[in-house]
Image (cartoon, helix red, strand yellow):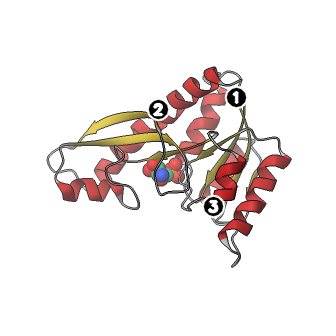
Amino acid sequence: MKLGILISGRGSNMVSIIEAVRDGRLPGCEVSVVISDKPEAPGLEKARRLGVEAVAVPRRGRTRPDHDAEIVEELAARGVEFVCLAGYMRLLSAGFVDAFRTRIINIHPSLLPNFPGLDAQRQALEAGVSESGCTVHYVDELLDHGPVILQKKVPILPGDTEESLSERILEVEHKAYIEALQQLSAEYR
Ligand code: GRF
């Protein structure tokens, strides 16, 4: 299963996927390319250092469908079969979703449908809930929306800050993304 990973920033989930492929924890998977809409994303250099091709496809004032069409072209040119969003900060257009329907997944730092959108960890703290976590889900045209593949819970502890909670959720995210891909790659083909 040829994976394309889309990022916009740090790329720690991306690194975790590349390492899992390298360690043999994702048999049958390879990471064919990492694409960022932000040329300055630190994740691009991290991917290259891990030996994975990494390219920036900036929006440059184009419409979302035009920008997405270029990303789809870049993915298709490398034979990508499955798209992993990992901190990719843009909604996908209908054209993108149709090109890879049921073959695009995302990770979000909350137990969806709770707290979609930005600052999910802060939203959870402000809501006063006792647990949050992360969700790996199929992607559609809506924000942080689509059938759930798996969720992992994380307790919210007394004294938690946005930072401490984000860190604890991120650790679990790295495991959740790999587990989801193990499940999906076993079902693939
Ligand atoms: C993660 O918390 C992910 O759930 C959210 O954006 C963050 C990306 O972090 N969608 P990283 O770039 O993978 O380190």
Per the image, the residue denoted by label 1 is 29
Q: CA distance from mark 2 to mark 1?
A: 16 Å
The location of residue 125, given as percent across then percent down, is 22, 55
C-beta proximity under 8 Å, tags 1 and 3: no
Toward which corner of the image does residue 130 lie, by quadrant? Answer: top left
* Mark drawn on residue 70: none
Per the image, the residue denoted by label 2 is 175
The location of residue 153, given as percent across then percent down, is 31, 35
Q: At 68% from the left edge and 74% from the top edge, which residue is drawn?
A: 63
Camera sees residue 38: yes
Q: Is mark 2 within 8 Å of ligand 1?
A: no
The location of residue 137, given as percent across then percent down, is 49, 41
Q: Residues within 10 Å of mark 1 (few under 14, many from 20)?
A: many
Mark before the other along the chain sequence, 2 or 1: 1
C-beta proximity under 8 Å, tags 2 and 3: no
- Residue at the extreme bottom of the image, as rendered: 61
Task: Please identify the quadrant where the N terminus is shown.
Answer: top right
Mark before the other along the chain sequence, 2 or 3: 3
* Mark drawn on residue 93: 3
Left/right of residue 72 with respect to residue 126 in the rendered view: right
Left/right of residue 145 with respect to residue 95 in the rendered view: left
